[in-house]
Image (spheres, rainbow, N blue to C red):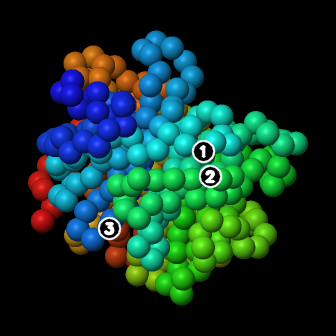
Amino acid sequence: MKSIITALLCGCLSYSALSVAKNPIIDTVFTADPAAIVYKDTVYLYTGHDEQEAGKAGFVMNDWLLFSSKDMVNWQAHGAILKVTDFKWAQHSAWAAHMIERDNKFYFYTSVYYDKGDKPGFAIGVAVADSPTGPFKDARGSALLTNDMTTQSPINWDDIDPAIFIEENGDAYMFFGNSVPKYVKLKDNMIELDGEIKVIDLPNFTEALWVHKKDDNYYLSYASGLPETIHYAMSKSIHGPWQYKGLLNEVAGNSNTNHQSIIAFKEKSYFIYHTGATQHNSPIGIGGEFRRAVAVDELKYNPDGTIEPIIMTSKGIVEPVN
């Protein structure tokens, strides 16, 4: 156990198996803001990394971690794939990220703090690798989007939580935002914006946009309120209009934030989220708002395409998915 924690913290590549059938799924290190992709026969789960001491307030997040699984039960730790300091232009705060694959390249979009320019605040950077496990490097040498490029909100953290969606015709879009939901088209090279930033009409939006598609329906899920719950809307187009459909996930125990990732894997769908509900007897100790841990439960659709409310469990995914 100690060797796994050491490997995670130092960023060394580790393939130590974390065989669990419980929630949270990772109990060797605090994790947050899950972003999962399915590539070939494997789920790659990218997470933030909470390092705050017990009883203290504030997010302490310096790097992003990677875990993988071929069955949604047994997870392998790959350590830290990227650090804030790998973006030479950024200062601190390894906040929520998103991974997407295109043409055998893997693009990692993330939120970091940037104190340069006329309007310092959170910015979005992008790293790239030839493999889902890295090594990753800054794809631009500069931010993809900075706080001075949006004017819809006076706060300096309104440009966070990037989430990428690629249409069947190859058009790629980045969804992002806090307090105001926004999206923008990306150029084919995936590291430049292609057009104006547009605002999305969603009720009671806070943050954590995530886009996925099933059949002919587009789904846009997001965090609402504080403490946050997850809600969702549906559309027949990536450009909307989005029809609000309701609550998807309740407050995730002992955490003011709630951040989701939705994937389809081997004919089932999954809702991946973080919670602050780890207990004293957990190997990593008691959780909380700044000490979160990633969990997963099954996601199910109704015949009309709407999604059943998520039932959060302490068991998680019990049977390996073959």
Contact between labelled residues 3 and 2, with CB atoms less than 8 Å apart: no
Question: Most extreme residue toward the right, as rendered?
Answer: 118
Tell me if residue 272 can be seen: no
| Foreground pick, 12 / 260 | 12
Tell me if residue 102 can be seen: yes
Number of residues whose C-alpha sits closer than 10 Å to that of mark 1, classed few (under 14), some (14–19) or many (20 or more): many
Q: In which quarter of the image is the N terminus?
A: top left
In this figure, which residue is indicated by the disc labeled 2?
Answer: 125
Q: What element carries label 3?
A: strand
Contact between labelled residues 3 and 1, with CB atoms less than 8 Å apart: no
Contact between labelled residues 1 and 2, with CB atoms less than 8 Å apart: yes
Query: Residue drawn 53% across and 70% down?
Result: 165
Q: Which of marks 1 and 3 is nearer the N terminus?
A: 3
Query: Residue drawn 27% across and 17% down?
Result: 280
Q: In which quarter of the image is the C terminus?
A: bottom left
Front of the two marks 2 and 3: 2
- State the CA–CA distance, disc 2 to disc 3: 22 Å
Picture mark count? 3
Q: In the rendering, at what x and y percent does residue 131 appear?
A: 37, 62
Q: Earlier in the sequence, mark 2 or mark 3?
A: 3
In this figure, which residue is indicated by the disc labeled 1?
Answer: 87
Q: What element carries label 2?
A: strand
Q: In this view, does 151 lie to the left or right of 314?
A: right
| Foreground pick, 188 / 291 | 188
Q: What residue type is labelled 1?
A: Phe
Question: Most extreme residue toward the bottom, as rendered?
Answer: 169
- State the CA–CA distance, disc 1 to disc 3: 26 Å
Q: Which of marks 2 and 1 is nearer the N terminus?
A: 1
In this figure, which residue is indicated by the disc labeled 3?
Answer: 39
Q: Is mark 1 on a helix, strand or loop?
A: loop
Q: In the rendering, at what x and y percent does residue 60 appear?
A: 52, 26
Q: Which amino acid does label 3 sit on?
A: Tyr
